[in-house]
Every structure is written in structure tokens, then in C-alpha cells.
Image: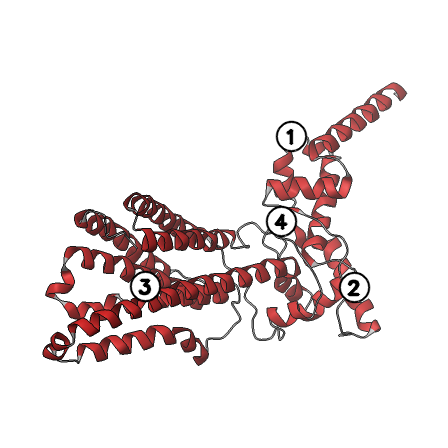
Amino acid sequence: MFSLNLNPQIIVNVSTVISSTLLFLAFLTFTKKSTALIGYRFLSLFLFFLTLNFANDAFSAGGGYLKHPVLMLIFQPGTYAIAPSFYLASVYLTSVDKKLNGKVILHFLPYIFLLAVCILTFQIPPDVIAANKTKENHIEKIASICLSTLLFLQIFWYLFLALRQLRKYRQSIPLFLSSFTGNDYKWLIQITIGLCMLSVIWLLESIAGMPLLSLIASIIYLCSFYYIGVQIMKQKDTPFFVPEQDQSVDDLSNNQEICVSHDIAISVNPGSTPLKKKVLTDEKVIKLEYQLLELMRKDKPYLDSEITLPKLSKMMLSNTYHMSYLLNECLEENFYTFINRYRIEECMRLFNDPAYDHFTILGIAFECGFNSKTSFNVFFKKITGLSPREYREQCNKKNALEVSSSLSNN
């Protein structure tokens, strides 16, 4: 992680601070209570292997391996488990219904292989190593180049897979959630992009050995890790699909041809592509549609800022798969658009109600179920063609004219 041209004591001090911070974050992440428990376990593992990586820098620069060479078995191979751990964290954080299986061990084969090689190397007698020192140095250089190349390829490959997984999750959000705020793992995408940039810096450090770059990178590392810790503590749970909701998120997403851009959080697309196959009979669709519209009229579930498709399905005594089919096939709207359209209509009603004149625009938005000012403003203008402020001013003028007309008649 650090250039060898740096003062060894600086490397030891900086690496110790960063590894201590990472170890604390790993502990916090491991103990976080969440429905996405497996995802946070892998994220904790990612932070733990990063801890070992920075601790390796401290031991290398401080001469710790000269006194305790066996510690190399603990610290050095872990570098090859960093990227797989992060990728698996992104998978299980965004797929809370996904079950852990033995195949995940395949992602850690490079780590296991390198660990086995290190253990076997330690079994070679010292006199044999000394007798083949010249030849070994040559082989060691070649091996070091190969391992470094494989490491960077592995890192960039897994970061690419993580970005793809997070993008897929963000595209599926409108199918199940009514709000992106706190649900989109935007911070995890930012961390992934940040890790890509830091990996490039790490690569430049390895090639050029620039001390200044190492110091700048260490500051970036530390700030990034504190940011990760804050976001982990703030992150809400993604919806959990209980067994009786017999269609998984992946099954439901894969059965719909819906394209959502990265900035869907503040966009509105009233239409959507129908499902590929017919799931409900026409009679069942008509019945469910009537029940849903009655539920929206009487109970107003859209006022709940945390409403999700699973919650709505439970209220309808149905399942997520059938409800999503109903929304997309019959009403031609995804869940996100459907719920927020009702919220906008409720906002419009309150703007026209003199009893809510003392409410601020944002207060009315929150009262109607929105939890993001930006998404409310953009959604409102998309539906009405006016900003909330412009619409309210029109309502106030209209109410004033009605009052004036009423007084004139009296």
C-alpha cells in the first residue's frame, strides 16, 4: 500500500492508525443488527482483510517479520480476499432473500492457494533456502510480478461485478419501494468507485514508488473508512421477503422488462413494459384491481413513508409477485410511480385545503408520505407541470377569489 521510499517510521505510524480504525469498523459492522445479516458479515470480512493488509505494511516497515516471520502467514495472503469479500457483501446486502451456499468458497480460492503456498514455503529448511539463494531471488521476482498482476486484475474484476450488482439492484427499486432515500445503497456505489480510484493509486505507487502519492493516499484511505462507518450505521434495511411471499426479488425482476436509469430516484415514468407471461386470470385481475383501488381510497397506505410492495401485498392478503403483475400489467405503472402519484394527488388536495395553510410545502410533502425534498419537487412538477410553490400560489389566489366572491354575495 505504501511506497518503500517513505520513512519506515511514517509507514508504521500511518498503517497502525488506519488498521486500528479498520478493525474497529469491522467490529461495528459485524455486530450490526439487520435483515441483511450475511451481507454485513461479508462487509465486516472485507474490512478485516483490509486491516490485515495495512498491518502487513506496518510489520514490513517496522521489521516485525524479521523477529516473527510466521506472522506473514496471517497478514500477506489476506490481500487476495479483499475484493471477493466486498463483492459478496454487495450481493448479500442487496439480496436479503439470497441464501448462503458453499459456492462462495470458490471466490476465496486465490487466498486459500496463496496461504497454502506460504505454509509450504515455511516448511523448507533454512539451509536449502541459503544454498539456492541466487536462483530463488530470480524466481521470487518473477513470482512477485505475477502475483501483483493477478491481484490488480482480481480487484478490478470484482469491483466491476460489484458495480453491476448494485446497478441491477437500483434498477429493481421501483418495483418494490416507494422511496429511494436510504434504500439505494448509493454510498456503496460511491465506495466501489472510490476503491477503483484507490486501486489505481495503489498501482501507481507500486510502479513508480512515489512517497507523496503514498501520503495523499493514506489520508484518502482514512477519510473513506470513516465515511464507510458512518454510512453503515445510517443504512436502513432493505425489504425482507418472508417465505410465504413465494417469488424472490430476482425472479420478479427478471420477469419484467423495465429499464430504470441511475437517476431514477428523481424521475417519473408513468408507463412500463408488461410482464412476459400471464400470471393471473382476467377475473382475478379485475378483482384485485378493485380491492387495491378501494384500499388506496379508504386506508391511504401511501401516507406511510416506509410503504413497500411486500407491505402492500400483506394488506391485500396477496403476494408480491401477483401485486407487481397487477400494477405493471393492469395499471401500467411500477410500484414507485403508483404510490408517489397518489402522494402527489394528496398533496394537491392539501394545498387546496385552507386548513393546511399554516403548513410549509415540505411539511405537506412529509405529511403525504414523501421523505425526500428533491424527489417530491421533481415528481410534483412532472405530474402537474408546476413546481409545488407555483401550484400553492395558484391555490391561494383561487381560495382568495372564492372568499372575496362569497363576501360580495353576502
Q: Amino acid at mark 2?
A: Glu
Tell me which amino acid carries mark 4: Asp
Is residue 86 depicted above or below 209 in this figure?
Answer: below
- Res 358 label: 1
Residue 49: image tag: 3
**Residue 308 image point, x, y percent:** 62, 59
Q: What residue sits right under mark 4 in the picture?
A: 263
Q: Residue at x 52, y 59 (%)?
A: 163
The Cα atoms of the two marked residues, 2 and 4, are separated by 30 Å
- The amino acid sitting under disc 3 is Phe
Horizontal and vertical percent position of residue 266: 64, 46
Dot in front, 1 or 3: 3
> Which one is earlier in the sequence, the residue at label 1 or at label 3?
3
- Label 3: few (<14), some (14–19) or many (≥20) C-alpha neighbours in 10 Å: many
* Disc 3 secondary structure class: helix
Q: CA distance from mark 1 to mark 3?
A: 54 Å
Q: CA distance from mark 3 to mark 2?
A: 51 Å
Alpha-carbon neighbours of circle 4 within 10 Å: few (<14), some, or many (≥20)?
A: few
* CA separation in Å, label 4 and label 3: 33 Å
The residue lying toward the viewer, choosing from 348 and 75, is: 75
Q: Nearer the viewer, mark 2 or mark 4?
A: 4
Is disc 1 surrounded by few (<14), some (14 to 19) or many (20+) residues within 10 Å?
A: few
Residue annotated with mark 2: 289
Q: Secondary structure at mark 2?
A: helix
Q: Choose the circle earlier in sequence order: 3 or 2.
A: 3
The N terminus: image quadrant: bottom left
